[in-house]
Amino acid sequence: MQVLNESIYDHPKFYDLVFGADCAAETKFILGCADRFTNRPAKRFFEPACGTGRLLYALARLGHDVDGLDLNEKSVDFCNARFERNQMPYRTFVADMSDFR
């Protein structure tokens, strides 16, 4: 048996296939929390550990400004390419959520 020393995060397209099914429900939950716990409509969202940006993209399509970061360069590149392909601004970058500015 061949053992691969890779992570699912190194394959963002497959990650989205596996985890993308509940994106609408997760987006609805995020927006529901924003409505419940903020005093005004939420316009900007920041996602640490954004991965492929599937939630950021869903929020951006609804008109929100979004930013994110992730440790995995391949995931961030995939995320930014998705925004670029759809002619949307992006500001996701590679960084550690426990130590960034």
Image (cartoon, rainbow, N blue to C red):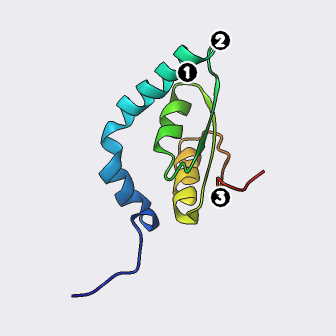
Which of the 4 quarters of the picture holds residue 100?
bottom right
Where does residue 16 sit, x and y in percent of width and height? 38, 51
Residue furthest to the right: 101
Task: Tell me if 16 is positioned left or right of 30 in this view.
Answer: left
- Please name the residue shown 30% across and 84% down the image: 3
Spatial distance from mark 2 to mark 1, Cα to Cα?
A: 9 Å
Residue at label 1?
A: 34
- Please name the residue shown 58% across and 64% down the image: 73
Crowdedness near tag 3: few (<14), some (14–19) or many (≥20) residues, C-alpha within 10 Å: some
| Residue type for callout 1 | Ala
- For numbered disc 3, what is the local secondary structure? loop
Q: Earlier in the sequence, mark 2 or mark 3?
A: 2
Spatial distance from mark 2 to mark 3, Cα to Cα?
A: 30 Å
- For numbered disc 2, what is the local secondary structure? loop
| Residue type for callout 3 | Asp
Residue at label 3?
A: 96
Where does residue 84 sit, x and y in percent of width and height? 59, 47
Count of residue discs: 3
Vertical position of residue 45 compared to residue 48: above or below? above
Where does residue 46 sit, x and y in percent of width and height? 63, 38
Task: Tell me if 33 is positioned left or right of 48 in this view.
Answer: left
Where does residue 49 sit, x and y in percent of width and height? 55, 51
| Residue type for callout 2 | Asn
Residue furthest to the bottom: 1
Check residue 39 in the rendering and tell me which mark sits there, or answer none.
2
Q: Earlier in the sequence, mark 1 or mark 3?
A: 1
Are the residues tagged 2 and 1 within 8 Å (C-beta)? no
- For numbered disc 1, what is the local secondary structure? helix
Vertical position of residue 10 compared to residue 37: above or below? below
Where is the N terminus found, in terms of image quarters? bottom left
Are the residues tagged 2 and 3 within 8 Å (C-beta)? no
Spatial distance from mark 1 to mark 3, Cα to Cα?
A: 24 Å
